[in-house]
Image (tube, rainbow, N blue to C red):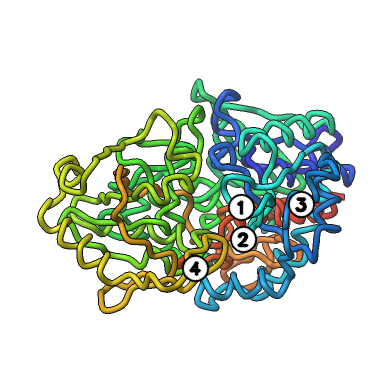
Amino acid sequence: MPDVPDVVVVGAGNAGLCAALAAAEHGGRVIVIERAPREERGGNSAFTGGGMRVTYDGPQDLRRLMPDLTEAEWQANDFGAYPAAAYYDDMALVTESRCDPDLTEVLVSRSLPTLEWMRGNGVRFAPAYHRQAFEIDGRFRFWGGLTVEAVGGGLGLVDALSAAAERAGVAVRYATRAIALAEQRGRICGVRVRARDGSEEVIPARAVVLASGGFEANAAWRTRYLGPGWDLAKVRGTRFNTGDGIRMALEAGARAAGNWSGCHAVGWDRNAPEFGDRAVGDGFQKHSYPFGIMVNAHGKRFVDEGADFRNLTYACYGREVLAQPRQFAWQIFDAKVTGLLRDEYRIKQVTKVTGDTLAELARKLDGVDAGAFLDTVKRYNEAVRVSIPFNPNVKDGRATEGISPPKSNWANRIDTPPFEAYMITCGITFTFGGLAIEARTANVQAEEGHPIPGLYACGELVGGLFYFNYPGGAGLTAGAVFGRLAGTQAARHAA
């Protein structure tokens, strides 16, 4: 069968492109099937900030990822270290130790080698300034384990990987939807696809890699698996991630795995569009809440805004916002901390009000009980332990006493005008439930426990890695790690 592609990859985001590149490197003839038109390529990856959580024992490891930095820039940054043990600890912490140990071991141990491989394929990395660092005494100090991001953010990442795939001879068919897997004698032998004009065909292949994302853009599936009210969430990313890859694999006998009632969901601008806007990217997110408070329609706080670094809480606080009356909240800051707010607070598409007094601000908080809000701020201010110094780079222990919920770190009185408030709702990024794979081959597992010959998976449709929550930047890294692995193993299977 000389004209049969060795590997067909379904999905042209970060994971799928890494799979295609790896398969091509191992001699495979590769075709990528992408449901979106070319101008909307990249899946959810295109809507991210490009942050990638990677283990490193010191600057010497990061130098291999960021050789473009000058020596003066190296001296101006305190990157610290993020050893493997810290990565394991963060994964265990946010998933309540439910993360699959084999998947986690592969993610952590292969994170740095995979990013070095990406760098070798033209992806450039830079320090995650303005998201993960604050300047103190002339040096930027990084915190929270997320130090590196792709130059150009998610769009830059997708463009670099797409260019690398083109150089490697990978063919991409856009506006083509995969609708079923082709099977022969228990082996996967291709993909049935549907073009925009409605015509269908089977693209034969010796191996198939599924990399088409979760089901976050499918309102019916969200409600079925995540629960009532999830149809009301906004989708942060692509409109095309409706669970096609998961459905096709399950129909072919694959085993479901992971946290099907869980997802990555964040605080997202209340008036953002229903799906992601590529021009704004992740700018609708609002992640500086550790430096202020959040209140609901009743004027009440409902979470510990300072429970941990935002990297370890932001992906589960969207769920908390969705659970509030009318599915919104307001984030409140005063002038002492507005200089610390992330860049996304300064975009023009923002739902923001200001006030020179708290009473004026209260009148402008749409949908909020103004009297209850003022009482909440009064009791919160009285509870702040001002004797403890404020330090945004560490969990400073500057907490509240005697109120519920508490604020465990970074508690400042809200007493210095002008005051600012930002209205948010829930924005869902990706779902945690998906397919079971063998960790060291990315081979999709059948319900009976054996691998399905010729079928591999990577990216957001893999289940078992994230439960309840998520450490920032681990998703793109997981997509790249398991994408490279899936592509390599698919090419070897095809050979």
> In terms of secondary structure, where does tag 4 sit?
loop
Which disc number belongs to residue 467?
Answer: 4
The residue that disc 3 covers is 484
Callouts 1 and 2 close, C-beta under 8 Å:
yes
Name the residue type under label 4.
Tyr
Callouts 1 and 3 close, C-beta under 8 Å:
no
Q: What percent of the width, then of the height, locates residue 232? A: 28, 47
Name the residue type under label 1.
Ala
Query: Between 335 and 59, which is closer to the camera in this rendering?
Result: 335
Name the residue type under label 3.
Arg
First in sequence: mark 1 or mark 3? 1
The residue that disc 1 covers is 133
Can you say whether 334 is above or below 104 in the image? Answer: above
Can you say whether 231 is above or below 153 in the image? Answer: below
Badge 1 local density, few (<14 within 10 Å), some, or many (20+)? many
Callouts 4 and 1 close, C-beta under 8 Å:
no
First in sequence: mark 1 or mark 2? 1
The residue that disc 2 covers is 143
Total marks shown come to 4
Q: Nearer the viewer, mark 3 or mark 2?
A: 2
Marks 2 and 4, how far apart at CA = 23 Å
Name which quarter of the figure residue 129 lies in.
Answer: top right
Q: Nearer the viewer, mark 2 or mark 4?
A: 2
Q: Nearer the viewer, mark 1 or mark 3?
A: 1
Q: Residue furthest top?
A: 197
> In terms of secondary structure, where does tag 2 sit?
loop
Residue drawn at x 30%, y 48% is: 231
Q: What percent of the width, then of the height, locates residue 76? A: 75, 49
